[in-house]
Image (cartoon, grey):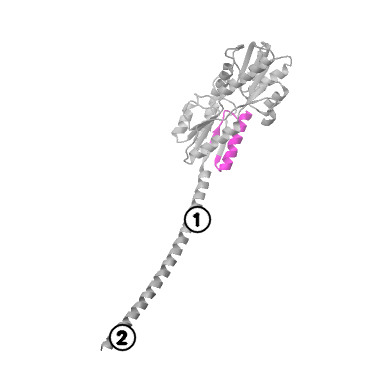
Amino acid sequence: MKKKLLAMLMAVAVVASLAACGGSGNSAATETTETTETEASDESTDAAEAETTDDAAATDASDVSVILVTMDGLDNHWVNVDAGASAAAKELGINYQWMQPDKKDVQLQIEVLNNAIAANPDVLIVAAVDPDAIVSTLQSALDAGIKLIYVDSPANLDASASFCTDNYAAGQEAGRQEIAQLEAKGITSGDIGIVSFSNATQTAVDRTQGFISAFDGTDYNILEVQYGNSEVAASQAAAENFISQGVVGLYGDNEPGAVGVGNAVAANADWDGVAVGFDATSTALDLVDSGALYCVMAQNPQGMGDGAVRAAYTLATGGTLEETQVDTGATVVTAENSADFR
């Protein structure tokens, strides 16, 4: 009996051992399979998330809308601002539009701004004709949730960023250049004529005041400023009037002003003074090369447009701007370096 009982116990032990071994092998196989499936699932999820992120970024870019409103569409300066803005917008893949009045006029710009605001862009980039007259219109844009960036000429209303020339400093440097050339000619006193494009636009005011400041403490006399209203013919007429009064120096503070002044000098070959201007357009550079203008102050309009659009994209996609007041710079262009600006 004991032998039979011992045999039975041994048999039970062998069966239990075999069962245990079989169970352990199946568990390991199942765990390995589940791990492999989980890893594959994680990889697919990661890939899907990457695609979703890429798609979202593309969608975000295509959904971003930016409108640039300049003072007018006539000056080559604004054409270059648009060129920089348009190139940046194309690179970023955002919706971009340039809107402008036919001429520099406050009411016309307000009409254009109202149309731009009605289009409900994410960001409005503005060059203000008048720093005060368009404030209520710009405020309506902010009230509608549209972000605001200034380019070239800000208004008296806080905006997210500004991309502008330091016009006072650039005007002052233009004055220094004129004084240096007058002194080189042995002319240490006399009247100076300024042809400005506006007495309301802050850009013009700063350029004029900066220019005048360069003459502090000298024996030169600044005559009453004349206005060409951003028209070449009117600017030339004003400059010729100054020449008839015997001025020794002339200054045109924007593209049409500089070209008008240069044309007046070219038409009065006997005049032996010094003329300087603003904006390095091809026509102005021709006048520099011919000697009608000693120099022009070259801004960076493409840089303004490029920087403003990139800032607009950052704001529209929830980013934070590292710099909000950007001086885009100005360079003295004479016949010696004019080729670099063509």
> Which range of residues does the magenta coloring cover?
67-95
Q: Looking at this view, name the residue that lies furthest to the right.
A: 269
The residue carrying mark 2 is: 7
Q: Nearer the viewer, residue 317 or 94?
A: 317
Which residue type carries mark 1?
Answer: Ala
N-term-proximal mark, 1 vs 2: 2
User: How far apart in space, not on screen, are marks 1 and 2 (Cα)?
Assistant: 61 Å
Residue 215 among those drawn in magenta: no
Residue 329 at x, y = what percent?
58, 28
Height in image: 246 above or below 60? above
Residue 247 at x, y = what percent?
66, 12
Q: Nearer the viewer, residue 30 or 254?
A: 30
Is 193 placed left or right of 13 in the picture? Answer: right
Quarter occupied by the C terminus: top right
The residue carrying mark 1 is: 47
For label 1, the SS is helix
Specify the quadrant of the image occupied by residue 78.
top right
Residue 342 visible to the viewer: no
Q: Nearer the viewer, residue 332 or 86?
A: 332
